Amino acid sequence: MHIQSTSWFPLNRYAPVREGWYEVRLVSGDTAFANFAAGEWTEKPLLVFTHWRGLSSDPARSAEVETIDAAAAAAVGVRAVWNAFFPGVGDEQHKPLDATHDAAAKAGR
């Protein structure tokens, strides 16, 4: 699937007009994702970012309301990025919720 994103916008000059998930460019040049809601960036990477861009530059799609499926897909993407940047070590390693509960259940037996 090819995503046709918008141009990059400097964070210090522009803010998104719609709530939703955006790709952000970190100071290092890498990219991550952040959510823009209620006029502020929420669920953003811990690292500083300087630019943002929308995930679709198709004007026909800009009027679409984001569904829970889209939010769930974005959350999976955010978790993948988080795990790539902050994998953890040993017992602190990020694991799927089911794996954590299964391990705790087995340890308690």
Image: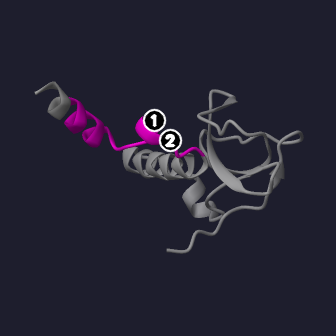
Q: Which residue is mark 1?
A: 92
User: How packed is label 2: few (under 14 Cα within 10 Å), some, or many (20 or more)?
Assistant: few
- Element under label 2? loop
Q: Nearer the viewer, residue 105 or 43?
A: 105
At label 1, the amino acid type is: Glu
Q: Quadrant of residue 30?
A: bottom right
* Residue depicted at x 69% and y 29%: 40
Q: Quadrant of residue 90?
A: top left
Residue 103 lies in the magenta stretch: yes
- Element under label 1? helix
Locate residue 73, reporting x and y percent.
43, 52
User: How packed is label 1: few (under 14 Cα within 10 Å), some, or many (20 or more)?
Assistant: few
Query: Seen in the image, is 21 located left or right of residue 89?
Result: right
Q: Nearer the viewer, residue 104 or 70?
A: 104
Mark 2 and mark 1: Cα distance apart in space: 5 Å
Question: Is residue 78 visible to us here?
Answer: yes
Q: Which residue is mark 2?
A: 89
**Residues in magenta, as a range:** 86-104
Locate residue 59, reporting x and y percent.
64, 61
* Residue depicted at x 68% and y 36%: 46
Q: Nearer the viewer, residue 62 or 47?
A: 47
- In this picture the colour scheme is one colour
Tag 2–tag 1 contact (CB < 8 Å): yes
Q: Quadrant of the C terminus?
A: top left
Query: Seen in the image, is 30 located left or right of residue 105?
Result: right
Locate residue 69, reporting x and y percent.
37, 49
Residue 2 lies in the magenta stretch: no
* Residue depicted at x 52% and y 41%: 88
Query: Seen in the image, is 83 located left or right of residue 18?
Result: left
At label 2, the amino acid type is: Val
